[in-house]
């Protein structure tokens, strides 16, 4: 995927702040607003830009409670279970793994009561045989 220097500059500006108004991007790149909008749309169509995101305040992130859950599944249910897990916004990552467990999921909530409820909800999903939960204390 070759991209020119102007697209590289646009991508760099969007990486710093994906909410920068088109007019500011156009001024920074010395091009028209239409040019910037067209380039963004082209980058999206080509799959170079998949989406726009936000960055949270580090203080907010420190207050979040994160956990990992190791999951054993009944044979033949992984697709169904994964779809149900993907529907839960508090699950930030789902990984299929080798070893004695089938999945590892990462959970993010604001309070221990929410984690308790989420763990109970996950354990009630048909096809989940066994789970082990680990609360993350620190990340380095």
Image (spheres, helix red, strand yellow):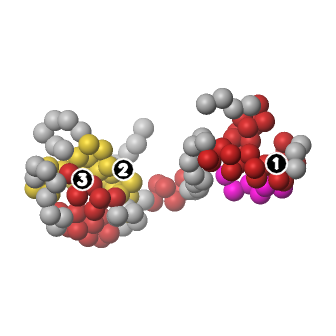
| Residue drawn at the location 20% of the way across and 51% of the way down | 78
From the image, state whether disc 3 or disc 2 is nearer to you: 3
N-terminal of the pair, mark 3 or mark 2, is: 3
Q: Which mark is residue 35?
A: 1
Look at the numbered disc 3 and give the secondary structure of its residue: helix
Quarter of the image where one finds residue 11:
top right
From the image, state whether disc 1 or disc 2 is nearer to you: 1
N-terminal of the pair, mark 1 or mark 2, is: 1
Q: Position of residue 43 (x, y in %)?
A: 66, 44
Mark 1 and mark 3: span between their CA atoms? 42 Å
User: Does any portion of residue 131 appear in the rendered image?
Assistant: no
In which quadrant will I find the C terminus?
top left
Local crowd size for mark 3, using a 10 Å CA cut-off: few (<14), some (14–19), many (≥20)? few
| Residue drawn at the location 35% of the way across and 64% of the way down | 87
Q: Judge from the rendering whether residue 53 lies leftward or rightward of residue 135; answer left or right.
A: right
| Residue drawn at the location 16% of the way across and 35% of the way down | 99
Toward the viewer: 21 or 65? 21
138, above or below 60, in the image: above
Local crowd size for mark 1, using a 10 Å CA cut-off: few (<14), some (14–19), many (≥20)? some
User: Does any portion of residue 18 appear in the rendered image?
Assistant: yes
Confirm whether the magenta stretch covers residue 114: no
Residue interval drawn in magenta: 18-23
Look at the numbered disc 1 and give the secondary structure of its residue: helix
In which quadrant will I find the N terminus?
top right
Mark 3 and mark 2: span between their CA atoms? 15 Å
Q: Judge from the rendering whether residue 63 lies leftward or rightward of residue 4; answer left or right.
A: left
Q: What residue is shown with label 3?
A: 79
Q: What residue is shown with label 2?
A: 93
């Amino acid at each position: 995927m070759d991209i020119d220097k102007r697209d590289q500059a646009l991508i760099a500006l969007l990486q710093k702040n994906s909410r920068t108004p088109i007019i500011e991007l156009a001024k920074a790149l010395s091009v028209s607003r239409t040019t910037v909008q067209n380039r963004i749309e082209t980058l999206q169509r080509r799959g170079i830009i998949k989406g726009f995101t936000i960055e949270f305040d580090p203080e907010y992130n420190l207050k979040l409670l994160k956990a990992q859950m190791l999951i054993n599944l009944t044979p033949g249910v992984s697709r169904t279970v994964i779809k149900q897990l993907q529907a839960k916004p508090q699950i930030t990552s789902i990984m299929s793994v080798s070893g004695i467990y089938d999945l590892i999921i990462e959970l993010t909530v604001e309070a221990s009561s929410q984690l308790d409820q989420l763990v109970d909800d996950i354990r009630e999903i048909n096809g989940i045989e066994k789970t082990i939960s680990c609360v993350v204390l620190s990340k380095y």
